[in-house]
Amino acid sequence: MGGTEIGFVNEAFTSNWIAPLGPNVDGFEQDLMKFTGSKAAAALSSGTAALHLALILSNVTAGDEVIVSSFTFSASVNPIVYQGATPIFIDSEEDTWNMSPILLEEAIKDRLSKGKKLKAIIVVHLYGMPAKMNEIMAISKLYNIPVIEDAAEALGSTYNGKAVGTFGKFGILSFNGNKIITTSGGGALISNNDDDVKKARFLATQARDNAPHYQHSTIGYNYRMSNVIAGIGRGQIQVLKERIEKKTEINQFYKKAFENTGILQLLHEPNPVFKSNFWLTTALLNHHKPEELRQYLETFNIETRPLWKPMHMQPIFSACPAYINGVSENLFERGICLPSGTAMTQDDLQTIIEKIKSL
Ligand SMILES: *Cc1c(COP(=O)(O)O)cnc(C)c1O
């Protein structure tokens, strides 16, 4: 926590706004719009809920297909299945580890030739690294398929000076406990279309028609963020810039330490168009299996994690169509998430680096 969160939470208590609406919810939405430059925002119970609503508002229904990055966390994909639609997986490209625009276009042509209904493209900005949005948006326009950006890990990242999450029809954010800022759990839907975001708020609060009694003409959800939780978010927004600076420093520290050592290669911004929030510093190992390094560091109480296991390799999604080039399988085979917590000291970082070098 940054320090000011408790003040906003106390405000919720003293004003007795303990509900999924209230001044902190409104304030947090304003903060998110200001930070990302999006025209509208809805604070929700999770990033997964935000993605689910984005799919509903893109008219994704049973029998449809939705294109999605394979190299991601399962929450990018599950809401497609909630809607009874089929995920179509697209592999990564080498520069950003995100969706390959080349494979994306190949897949669209192939699905359309098979007579499939493609309703949306979910592009993920993984580990904070922006995907190649120029290329992806051009394809989206050419084939008239809307883009939903999963920016759950990329709040504060920019592409061409513009916040990720604001290129597509919708962007989704997460404030889960592990993200760059957190409300313990929570998410948001952002968009440049205020009407769409109004619809999202309506669906997120059980879809109550405008009547004095309880009347419903659509299926609703209980997806709104509480006013208590939004108070944490308002405080966290105040330290977001600081967090990004610290995450970037950590990344630079690792970069300097491993430059020209031949030990590993860090995921890095391909050129100045890409600005990562460096949520996690990730790397490919040149000589060791990530699991070997993970177990070695664990003996010193240093926690690392494997990279996300691609969705096309997951048992639950093995029957889904996938357009694959081997990139994400190689990343999973060779990659590791290095400790990236902003509470680490330089001594902590130095110790981690020395242990990796010693192995
Ligand atoms: C965390 C995460 C989500 C889901 O967000 P929740 O708030 O945990 O539901 C979605 N996509 C990616 C890539 C994530 O890392």
Image: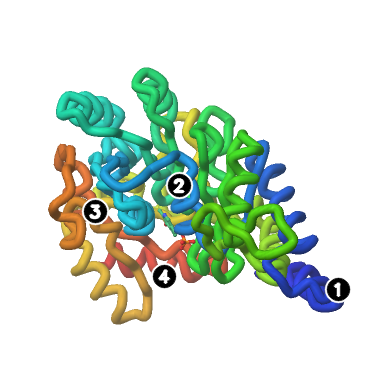
Q: Nearer the viewer, residue 337 or 9?
A: 9
Residue 69 visible at all = yes
Whether the residue carrying mark 1 lies under 8 Å from ligand 1 is answered with no
Label 1 to label 4: alpha-carbon separation: 47 Å
Which of pointers 1 and 4 indicates the residue nearer the eye?
A: 1
Report the residue marked by disc 4. Answer: 351
Q: Residues within 10 Å of mark 3 (few under 14, many from 20)?
A: many
Which of pointers 1 and 3 indicates the residue nearer the eye?
A: 1
Residue 295 location (% of width, % of height): 24, 75
**Could you tell me which quadrant the N terminus lies in?**
bottom right
**Reading the chain from its start, which is encountered first: label 3 or label 2?**
2
Residue 29 location (% of width, % of height): 69, 51
Residue 309 vs 33, above or below: the answer is below
Tell me, for residue 337, which label it has, or none.
none
Q: Nearer the viewer, residue 36 or 202?
A: 202
Report the residue marked by disc 1. Answer: 15
Residue 243 location (% of width, % of height): 60, 56
Amino acid at dot 1: Ser
Amino acid at dot 2: Ile
Which of pointers 4 and 3 indicates the residue nearer the eye?
A: 3
Whether the residue carrying mark 2 lies under 8 Å from ligand 1 is answered with no
Label 4 to label 3: alpha-carbon separation: 34 Å
Report the residue marked by disc 2. Answer: 56
Amino acid at dot 4: Thr
